Image: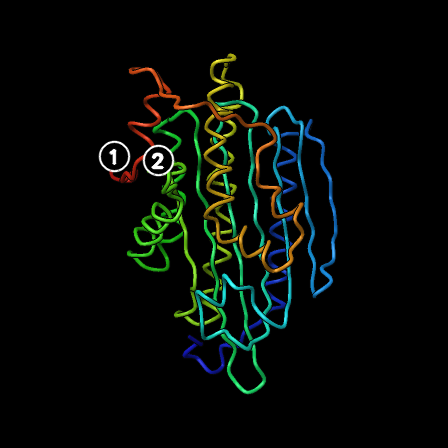
């Protein structure tokens, strides 16, 4: 689908400039949250076209590992996963750019968070471009706190509100459905927002929505980190965190569209797999003890809930 507004021109340069600025802003604020973290910045080039900047935090007091990636890749043809999903893109060159981040905290009471905002544009000399925006963010707690869940979803709903009353409910449900680990029959976390193929508002309005979502990530996540970062914990909580991180790995390697697209399009493997946690464990047929905080996570948090409608 193309924009219905003939003067609403696709402006890839503006998207590129915003995404680079967003990456820098997020990295600056994360460094303030965790000044002890080691930081690394890598610029890379893709032989087929394009490149990116990977910025990685590790071994901090707050974040055990995290990264904020910017990429802008180009190609003459799409990988199989993309062309199978969108047959109308066959025979087109493409450009894909985005910022993607994952933060894995050290303290088990601080949740893992993920955010992605992206733009895709497919062109052919004799046709109008086919473009869309996508992205969102989701939260993966190891120990559930209703206060944190309500805050996370309240920020998401506020960001969506200027674009229509149905936007947050629709993208929340899409997030619940997308970040679902089918072979485990459980959600990855408490959700948030997920959107894709967004182009029916015209380029300018869709780009505005992308910026609002990207800019709302830190206000959603930072207060939760500040609230939980100094909570005392022991080895039992740490081992449960490592066990639950296994679910994150399973989803990213089996289902995540971004991971599959990146690997199939010849992206930089180190940057694509940056989202994986540094330490993880799998225990055979592990079950939480009834009445424990670990059981509460499964019973009360790992299911779709209307967080805004709950006191």
Name the residue rendered at 53%, 62% in the picture. 119
Whether residue 176 sits left or right of residue 222 in the image: it is left
Is residue 85 shown above or below 160?
below
The residue singled out by tag 2 in the image is 150
Is residue 251 placed above or below 13 in the rendered structure?
Answer: above
Q: Specify whether residue 201 is in view.
A: yes
Q: Position of residue 209 (x, y in %)?
A: 45, 59
- Residue 267, labelled with which disc? none
Tell me what residue is drawn at x 47 percent, y 17 percent: 237
Labels 2 and 1 touching (C-beta < 8 A): yes
Q: Secondary structure at mark 2?
A: helix
| Left or right relative to 235: residue 69 | right
Position of residue 239 relative to residue 181, above or below, is: above
Position of 245 with respect to 177 (left or right) is: right
Task: From the viewer's side, name the closer residue of 225 and 76.
Answer: 76
Q: Residue 191 vs residue 113: left or right?
A: left
> Please, is residue 199 above or below residue 175 in the view?
below
Quarter that holds the N terminus: bottom left
* Residue found 41% across the figure and 38% down from its top: 188
- Mark 2 crowdedness (10 Å alpha carbons): few <14, some 14-19, many ≥20: some
Q: How is the image coloured?
A: rainbow
State whether residue 109 appears in this view.
Answer: no
Q: Nearer the viewer, residue 49 or 192?
A: 49
Q: Which residue is mark 1?
A: 310
């Amino acid at each position: 689908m193309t924009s219905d507004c003939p003067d609403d021109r696709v402006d890839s340069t503006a998207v590129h400039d915003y995404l680079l600025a967003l990456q820098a802003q997020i990295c600056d604020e994360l460094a303030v949250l965790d000044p002890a973290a080691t930081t690394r910045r890598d610029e890379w080039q893709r032989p087929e076209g394009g490149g990116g900047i990977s910025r990685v935090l590790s071994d901090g007091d707050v974040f055990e590992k995290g990264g904020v990636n910017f990429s802008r890749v180009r190609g003459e043809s799409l990988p199989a996963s993309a062309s199978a999903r969108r047959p109308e893109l066959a025979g087109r060159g493409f450009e894909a750019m985005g910022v993607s981040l994952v933060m894995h905290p050290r303290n088990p009471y601080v949740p893992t968070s993920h955010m992605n905002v992206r733009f895709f544009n497919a062109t052919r000399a004799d046709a109008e471009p086919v473009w869309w925006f996508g992205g969102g963010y989701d939260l993966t707690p190891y120990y559930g706190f209703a206060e944190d869940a309500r805050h996370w979803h309240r920020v998401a709903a506020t960001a969506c509100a200027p674009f229509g009353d149905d936007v947050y409910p629709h993208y929340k449900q899409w997030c619940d459905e997308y970040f679902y680990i089918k072979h485990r029959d459980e959600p990855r976390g408490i959700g948030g927002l997920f959107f894709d193929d967004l182009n029916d508002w015209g380029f300018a309005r869709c780009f505005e929505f992308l910026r609002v979502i990207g800019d709302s990530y830190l206000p959603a996540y930072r207060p939760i980190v500040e609230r939980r970062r100094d909570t005392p914990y022991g080895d039992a909580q740490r081992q449960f965190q490592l066990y639950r991180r296994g679910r994150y790995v399973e989803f990213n390697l089996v289902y995540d569209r971004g991971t599959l697209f990146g690997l199939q399009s010849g992206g930089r493997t180190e940057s694509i797999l940056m989202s994986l946690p540094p330490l993880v464990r799998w225990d055979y047929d592990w079950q939480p003890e009834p009445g424990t905080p670990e059981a509460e996570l499964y019973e009360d948090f790992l299911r779709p809930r209307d967080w805004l409608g709950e006191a």
